[in-house]
Amino acid sequence: MKRRDFLASASAISLPVMVNGFGITSLSNRSSLVQALMGTAAAATDRILVIIYLNGGNDGLNTVIPLQYYSKYQGIRSNIAIPEAKVLTLSGMPEAGLHPAMTGMRDMYNQGRLAIVNSVSYPNPNQSHHRSSDIWMTATDANQYANSGWAGRYLDNRFPGYPQNYPNDTMKDPLALQIGVLNSTSLLGPQSPMNISVENVNNFYALLNGGQGLPTNDLPCCEAGEMIKHVRQQQILSTGYSGQIKKAYDAGQTLAAYPAAGTTTELSEQLKIVARLIHGGLQTKIYFVELGGFDTHGDQVTAGDTTVGTHATLLKRLSEGVSSFQNDLVAQGTADRVVGMTFSDFGRRANSNASRGTDHGVAAPMFVFGNGIKRQMVGVVPDLNNDLEPPTTSPTNENQEVKMQVDFRRVYSDILRDWFGAQGTVTDSLLFRNFKTTSLFSNVIETTASGAWPDRSIWSAGRPPGAGDYVRVNPGHVVAVGQNITVRNIEVEGGGELNILGNYVINTTG
Amino acid sequence: MAYLDPYTVPLTANKAAHLLRRATFGPTRAEITAFTGLNPGTAVDQLFANVAVTASPPPPIDLTPTSPNYQKPLMSYPFIASKSGEHSVHLRYWWVGLMMLQNNKPSVLEKLTAFWQNHFVVSQNVMADYRYMYRYLKFLRDNSLGNFKTMTIGITKDPAMLIFQNGHGNNKDHPNENYARELQELFTVGQQDYYGNPNYTEEDVKAASKVLTGWMVTNYYVSGTSDFTANFHRNYHDTSNKTFSAKYGGITIQGRSDDTAGDVEMNELVDMLLRHPETPKHICRKLYRWYVNQNVTQDIENNVIVPLAAFFASPENNYNIKPVLEKLLKSEIFFADQNVGSIIKSPMEYLLGMGRYFELPCPDMMTDTAAYVNYIRFFLWGMGGMNLEILTQPLVFGYPPYYQVGYSKNWINGSTITARRGNSDTIIFPSQVVKPGYTLGIDFLAWIQKIQPNFADSSGTPAITPDEVLAAFSKNLFALDLSDTQKNYLIDVVFMQNLPRIEWRYELNAYRSNPANTTAANSVKNRCSNLMRYMIRMAEYEVF
């Protein structure tokens, strides 16, 4: 109650400055950002986020393979390493490649629709599934607890008074829709879940059919079976907003190819439903879908071929589902207003175990996809020679973890502020403090600290700006330049400084 | 198989639970254990013998802490009209407390009293005098295993019923047919027989109403009065002869005019009603629907209702209730597989049953009154939100799911599903404080500690598996056994959330080796509460 009151009053006293529907905190400071944002076609109020939960802790090093450090990669996980020649290479990004099962997402990368955020985690990482996924979903520090989820808090802030005052004339549809068994903590608001959920794809279709069409093969005989069937139908019919959901589903169409009958997966079917609802005009802001099975302690790959096995199957499902979904959005013309993101409980250990698997670890890549991304690589692939923790192994501890580069809450912050257009102060309060941008949705890379230009740790995107980037040196930051540079433009804020160490050229291409 | 033959197979846990679910408001787990293996006849006999344990409970008391009469019996001081609403609710608290009593002496009493209360309905929607209501309820409770004729006569001149069905206003100059109709349509012969033929005529309603003229109550809703009763007033009695239709054999009840006329004519009327062959069938059908199955097929009519009714009305039984209910509860048909899980739980069976199954103890009304109120409040208003307010039937017909087409299916709709889920969540995620040190709900960590052998010895004794957790948590939770597919789904998808099952053992051992660690404890607790929440929300949990 107290927390809700706090949030309500916080939003009441500081009205956002609206620019084309965007809440921009400090217009003058972020002028390049504003330009960048205004370049996108859709209004912010139409924007949608699709969250894909990879349940179990995805093995990052076999998802995005650090080609730059291939021999070390091969050395620390020889029994599961993907052969170098089989790794899918990425256009213009030689340091990284994708698992061979991920052709769909490779194509998305090459088309500019997929971003890889490298080595995402949080300080003091926890390796309990329960606790770590809770940290990801509540967006707290590792030693703090919250009773609501990050996306739930956002929706509660944007749609105050839910669920009592909803649906209403301005919001007739579910704020969030989840297809899954258990309500995700991510969508839990301060008072109640902010989402409508449907247990699985079958139940979704039963909902469209007025509760008819549920499987009957598990019903007991006689009246008991009849009663159970009745209750199940009523449960389906009691799904909130079912009328609106059905209306949108009926109005929408599927315009792209999804995995063919017989090869469909729960994830591809879920995303197919989501795309059709979007096409049908459902105003739902956040969709949450899930793919389970990533806890690959053993037999992650087969003995004979490391490119097949449990993990390959999972990544194929992910890649096929996501790429079909993206193609569908493009065909619908809705691709500009939908982004998706993946997350998992944690990454897995850098070194493999003896069971051709990997144990619980720390950092792993997140994927963010859609036309709205302005950057395809945040951070760099894990430097397996220098960035493992601990740096060296010993006979008593042969385990090494992938070190964090990016706090996951920086991605959340970018999604809330730059994608959904939440005010900066609101975003900060929803995430309990300010998190520096990763510039995922901006073609401006800004400084986060002082240092030498090539030092990736001083840049918001976790890597030095390239020729296509606008650059901003923030107040108080001094960047030492000891090389020639080509960027689109550089803006040095008052109190910021470019310290040119010699006779070097800075080319701006506009 | 003759359906009414005694079932003689020693009770499995499943059948013991079935008996207890139907004959009481739901078993505690300890009761199921105690009844497992018993001969069905012995088990049923215990349910009747245990009636004596709670036959004379402490009467209802004033539960408002700020009231000058706090904790005093409601009947111990003169009527206070301004307190009628409050005290009427206190009466409900009293009865729900009896339903929730867990003394390891399960008995048929409260469930059977509830049957009669939903048969001879008086509703607090109308009945504003809590003394009247208590007397009425106590009469039903005291006579629930007694004689049906005694009960019918008693209820016909019960002060609360005289108010509720306008008998109080029924006199020779202004006859009121309300009670005379319900007496026949609902309480005795029933509106029609199994084949749809009417059991009485409109003339019979008029004639019966004349028989019942002259009964009046005293001190209804009069503040400061210490007693009340129902009296017969011969001056208001219709002294004419009352002739009934061929449905009753064309009998005439001779009109009388002395002070005994009311009782004598009423006695003859009830005798006539009870001689009607449809009366015992009507009552037996209703008992069958309450205890066994709401679908009375032609086969059931022929082979259960007709013979049971014949026994009910037979000279040797003479309308005694207890032998009939004994026969039914001991029968083959009661224990038949197809009748297990055949009814959707009413809010009583759902919520009271949940509190009893999870063995959430009811504080003592007299010595722990504030805690008692906190405890009962949850169950009483929880049931209200699910469309059953105790003692508050919308009409004299009773709660609609006991008579309307579809019967118990009527308990389930979008809003009641939401209410059921909300109430069960309160039990699964404990938040309601009954008193310091007692929060209502399931303590999953304590449960795990109990079922894990050598809990503290995580290195020497293996952690219990997810299958074992499911087996413990779902033991007799459902009326019907889950299929293997359902069990695997519950374990892998709901409990493990698609993680390998071995993860649970890591997590449980982490908790065993460091029980004070919040993260370790929460990961165990959350898996358990997710599993239970899902199971309670399954349609399979809704049937009993």
Image (cartoon, helix red, strand yellow):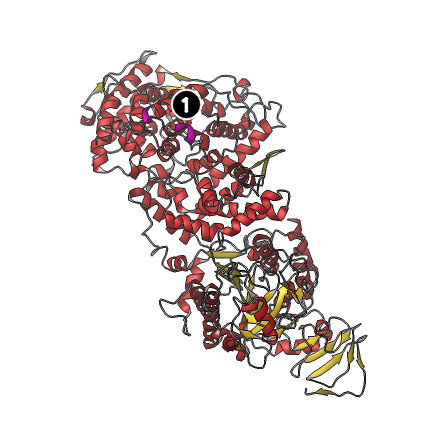
> Which residue has dot 1 on it?
B141
Q: Is residue B131 left or right of residue A449?
A: left
Nearer to the camera, B179 or A26? A26
Q: Is residue A50 left or right of residue A507?
A: left
Let me know if residue B194 appears in the view. Answer: no
Residue name at image x 76 percent, y 71 percent: A449
Quick check: A473 above or below A212?
Answer: below
**Which picture quadrant has residue B18?**
top left
- Chain letter, disc 1 residue: B
Q: Measured along the vertical axis of the image, is residue A2 above or below residue A250?
A: above
The x, y position of residue B189, in whole percent, is 26, 28
Count the marks.
1
- Can you see residue B138? yes
Quick check: A44 left or right of B42? right
| Magenta segment, prevailing SS (helix, strand or loop) | helix
- Looking at the picture, how far across and down is residue A269, in whole percent? 42, 65
The boundaries of the magenta stretch are: B32-41
| Percent x, y of residue B415 | 45, 47
Residue furthest to the front: A395
Query: How busy is the neighbourhood of tag 1: few (under 14 within 10 Å), some, or many (20 plus)?
Result: many
Q: Is residue B40 magenta?
A: yes
